[in-house]
């Protein structure tokens, strides 16, 4: 039980009627249908469905956005923003796919070597999380639900 790499299973699913505040971390896939305020971290993939809203940084090998994300995204493999997806924040990935109809407001970083990306993700995520938290405080005053 001590070795993370030997763990297998279906991963984590956040239901459409769930609001989670804090860090969501899983070695396997994470699928979000509800609302998450905080970090979303997976060693494999993160899928943000059409009904999902994430306020905070997202980090995984593969990230797919069909809902809304307000925060930085680090995808060591591929980042895909679907036609219904909305991203407000910086992205770092080596493979970016923004579908027609998607919304992307922010800065995109595409490092040439995946090793540089992995190091950047490890070193900068905690600091990014702090910055996102401060930015989110400012955004909250303008948010309409």
Image (cartoon, helix red, strand yellow):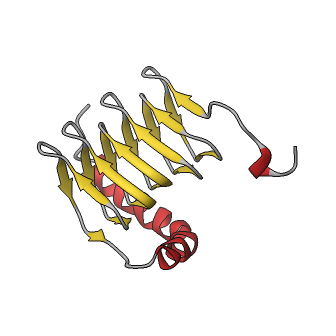
Name the outermost residue toward the left: 101
36 or 83, which lies in front?
83
Name the outermost residue toward the right: 1
Q: Quadrant of residue 91?
A: bottom left
Which x, y percent locates residue 5?
A: 75, 51
Identified at 52% across, 34% down, the residue is 20
108 or 137, which lies in front?
108
The answer to whether 68 appears left or right of 47 in the picture is left
Q: How many marks?
A: 0
129 or 66, which lies in front?
66
In the rendered image, the quadrant that contains the C terminus is top left
Q: Determine whether 105 is above or below 145 in the image.
A: below
Q: Determine whether 69 is above or below 9 in the image.
A: below
Identified at 46% across, 67% down, the residue is 128
Identified at 37% across, 77% down, the residue is 111
Which x, y percent locates residue 70?
A: 33, 50
Which x, y percent locates residue 133?
A: 44, 58
Which x, y percent locates residue 138?
A: 31, 57
The answer to whether 136 appears left or right of 22 in the picture is left
In the rendered image, the quadrant that contains the N terminus is top right
Identified at 29% across, 59% down, the residue is 96
140 or 11, which lies in front?
11
């Amino acid at each position: 039980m001590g070795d993370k790499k030997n763990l297998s299973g279906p991963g984590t699913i956040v239901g459409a009627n769930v609001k989670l505040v804090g860090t969501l971390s899983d070695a396997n896939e994470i699928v979000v249908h509800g609302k998450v305020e905080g970090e979303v971290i997976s060693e494999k993939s993160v899928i943000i469905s059409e009904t999902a809203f994430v306020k905070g940084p997202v980090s995984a090998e593969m990230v797919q956005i069909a809902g809304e994300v307000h925060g930085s995204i680090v995808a060591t493999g591929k980042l895909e923003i679907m036609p219904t997806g909305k991203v407000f924040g910086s992205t770092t990935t080596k493979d970016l796919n923004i579908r027609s109809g998607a919304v992307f407001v922010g800065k995109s970083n595409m490092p040439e070597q995946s090793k540089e990306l992995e190091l950047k993700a490890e070193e900068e995520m905690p600091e990014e999380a702090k910055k996102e938290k401060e930015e989110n405080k400012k955004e909250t005053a303008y948010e309409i639900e």
